[in-house]
Amino acid sequence: MNHAIRIHEHGGPEKMRWEEVPLPAPKPGEALVRHHAVGLNYIDVYFRTGLYKLPALPAVLGMEGAGVVEAIGEGVTEVAVGDRVAYATGPVGAYAEARTLKADRLVPVPENIPLELAAAMMLQGMTAQYLLRTTYRVKPGETILIHAAAGGVGLIMVQWAKHLGCTVIGTVSTPEKAELARAHGADHVVLAGEDLPAAVKKITGGAMLPVVYDSVGKDTFLASLDCLRPLGMMVSFGNASGPVPPLDIGILAAKGSLYLTRPTLASYTTKREDLLAVAKDLFDVVGSGAVKINVNQRYALKDAAQAHRDLEARKTTGSTILLP
Ligand SMILES: NC(=O)c1ccc[n+]([C@@H]2O[C@H](COP(=O)([O-])OP(=O)(O)OC[C@H]3O[C@@H](n4cnc5c(N)ncnc54)[C@H](OP(=O)(O)O)[C@@H]3O)[C@@H](O)[C@H]2O)c1
């Protein structure tokens, strides 16, 4: 028997059902993975609500998991039965006790990384990696802004940016989260509701920022643009508060010939060699202790709806795992 959290229609967490689902044997190129843990990510909310399109309904939610390979299909060379593996680049279907998926999306997990930690860090950590190392490659001495700094991606990015020699400004919604972000290296924390561009102006002595990493979306987009210096880079990589409405690109000219990108992890890891390189960089910073993964919430997989409620109510900090 294989159980999973499935939705039959889009909507709130109440649409998530713990059900028996088929577990197909791996076809050529596929592997069957028995999950030790599943990662909770904000993208799971977007797929549940319908903001992001699912290929079909009913659908098992979830992008990220870690476990052990139990069977492989014909022609699979990337992994073998018994390997410890993790993945985070889809397709959806991770909220399950076990699943089959393309073997070339699986990353072998090093011995020093427990599988529960792997499930907590692959999606958020590989995102931190490509944002800081490729989308805008931060340099030592630069001051940068990271929104939702006490969240899953946020706490990893704050630590990684500090490790790379940046001065980090973070935004959070509560004094407790501000404390947590500071404890992980944030040099300055601005609370939601404060005048963000004014705070950045004061911190930088008027120089403003070369880059802003904005995962909040609708509520922060315009204020984020106002934190950039001319020719600065706006990285809009999420929509926790709702999607950014359509905009007149003339605003980028008016605010100083700004660059704007809307990146996704999938585009940065399409080739297997890129996926493995991004994952290796992540395993290295976690293995060396430069970045600590905070698994601050654990839920039984069958209680994933409660995990969604807490994530959307901004009650979680750091990373969250779901246990089959
Ligand atoms: N493009 C990509 O490749 C990619 C990959 C991974 C994640 N992401 C994005 O990165 C963001 C963070 O993901 P995560 O999984 O690590 O989640 P998370 O940061 O742990 O949780 C979301 C956080 O967003 C903040 N937030 C601000 N306004 C909110 C609102 N109206 N409702 C709910 N939360 C709000 C909250 O922090 P405060 O209470 O402190 O404001 C909340 O804790 C998400 O937007 C996600 O979609 C993008």
Image (tube, helix red, strand yellow):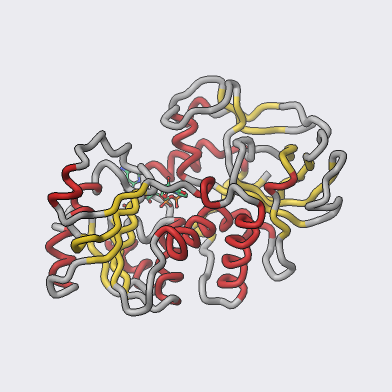
The residue located at (74%, 40%) in the rendering is 98
Which of the 4 image quarters holds residue 219?
A: top left
Which of the 4 image quarters holds residue 174?
A: bottom left
Q: Observer-nearest residue: 163 or 118?
A: 163
Q: Observer-nearest residue: 251 or 154?
A: 251
Image location (x, y in percent) of residue 304: 55, 39
Q: Is residue 230 above or below residue 314?
A: below
Q: Is residue 213 above or below residue 179?
A: above
Q: Observer-nearest residue: 158 or 230?
A: 230
The residue located at (59%, 47%) in the rendering is 270
The residue located at (28%, 67%) in the rendering is 169
Q: Is residue 158 above or below residue 98?
A: below
Q: Observer-nearest residue: 113 or 166?
A: 166
Image quarter in which the C terminus is found: top right
Tell me: 189 left or right of 84.
Answer: left
Image location (x, y in percent) of residue 55: 57, 26
The residue located at (54%, 46%) in the rendering is 266
Tell me: 90 left or right of 149.
Answer: right
Total marks in image: 0
Image location (x, y in percent) of residue 248: 19, 37
Q: Is residue 81 above or below residue 282?
A: above
Tell me: 296 left or right of 90.
Answer: left
Image location (x, y in percent) of residue 195: 14, 57
Image quarter in which the N terminus is found: top right
